[in-house]
Image (tube, grey):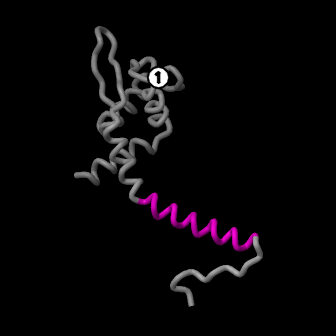
Amino acid sequence: MVTDQLDSTFAALADPTRRAILARLVDGEASVGELAAPFAMSQPAISKHLKVLERAGLISRHRDAQRRLCRIEARRLADANAWLERYRALWEANFERLDALLAELQRGDQPTPARGAS
């Protein structure tokens, strides 16, 4: 179940239009028309993007009188961030080793062999 949620989240985030829509919603609720304004695409095309975001749980929609408003739902983004955070320590350790190697090379030292190297 969690894998399916992550898959739909990352699939939704893969599109630049959907990322731009989410970036706009960080500032607060917006109508479909307001979300469509910056894009050179039809209202039905924007609606399709909104449906993908809604199915992924990244936005919710509700009516306010005549307007259909969208709002960002942070929970799915938090789940994706938590998944990515698991790999941050690995990335940081690799960068720290690279920084140490570069510092050694700048000093003219011989690089220290990596663990496990013969």
Q: In the displayed structure, does residue 98 sit left or right of residue 29?
A: right
Image coordinates of residue 68 in percent, x first then y, are 33, 17
Residue 23 included in the magenta stretch of the image: no
Image coordinates of residue 88 in percent, x first then y, are 46, 58
Q: Quadrant of the C terminus?
A: bottom right
Q: Which residue is mark 1?
A: 36
Q: Amino acid at mark 1?
A: Ala
Foreground: 52 or 108? 108
Q: In the displayed structure, does residue 62 sit left or right of residue 94?
A: left
Rendered view: 109 above or below 98: below
Residue lying farthest to the left in this orientation: 1
Residue drawn at (57%, 80%) of the image: 114
Find the magenta span and give its range: 87-106
Residue 102 included in the magenta stretch of the image: yes
Residue drawn at (35%, 43%) of the image: 78
Image coordinates of residue 77 in percent, x first then y, are 37, 41
Can you tell which quarter of the image residue 95 is in?
bottom right
